[in-house]
Amino acid sequence: MPSVFTRIIRGEIPCYQVAENEHYMAFLDINPLQKGHTLVVPKQETDYIFDLEDKVLSGLFVFAKEVAGKIEKVFPCDRIGITVIGLEVPHAHVHLIPIHEEKDMNFSGPKMVLSAEEMLEIAQRLSEA
């Protein structure tokens, strides 16, 4: 059965898309830790990130670097935090999160609740960056 991310990539489930190319896609996390929290996924469905072929894995991080640049332009921050957890969805992905301090990446803490309008505005601003 395809992962939720594969279904997003196929257009079966809507998302707040930030960027896309032939091999990768970036979209907003619907349970963000910070405004601009973005997920970057390979279009190839592979559960565990370290099971990706080297070329796909390195390409994922190069694409994530491009997306991080967009996030920095739209959301001034000290860093773009990056993390791979990989337990919540069985599809390799990285989280890009604009941060000012370590606690901004606390996945155990409360998530932000943003309206559909806010999410759409954020996605548009990042797409245009």
Image (spheres, grey):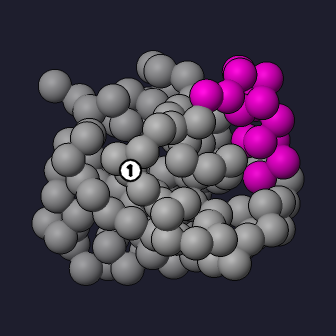
- Quarter of the picture containing the N terminus is top left
- Quarter of the picture containing the C terminus is bottom right
* Count of marks placed on residues: 1
Residue at 47% from the left image edge and 38% from the top image edge: 110
The residue to which callout 1 is attached is: 107
Please tell me whether mark 1 sits on a helix, a strand or a loop: loop
Observer-nearest of 45 and 70:
70
Residue at 55% from the left image edge and 23% from the top image edge: 14
In this rendering, the answer to whether 115 lies above or below 60 is: above
Q: Amino acid at mark 1?
A: Phe
Q: Is residue 71 visible?
A: yes
Left or right of residue 46, residue 41 in this image? right
Query: Within the image, what quadrant is residue 58 found in?
Result: bottom left
Magenta stretch, main secondary structure class: helix
Residue 57 percent location from the top left of the image: 32, 73
Residue at 62% from the left image edge and 50% from the top image edge: 34
Residue at 61% from the left image edge and 28% from the top image edge: 113
Observer-nearest of 61 and 94:
94
Q: Is residue 46 visible?
A: no
Residue 31 percent location from the top left of the image: 50, 35
Q: Callout 1: few (<14), some (14-19), or many (20+) C-alpha neighbours within 10 Å? A: few
Observer-nearest of 86 and 79:
79
Q: Which residues are magenta?
A: 113-126
Q: Is residue 37 magenta?
A: no
Left or right of residue 119, residue 121 in this image? right
Residue 124 percent location from the top left of the image: 81, 41
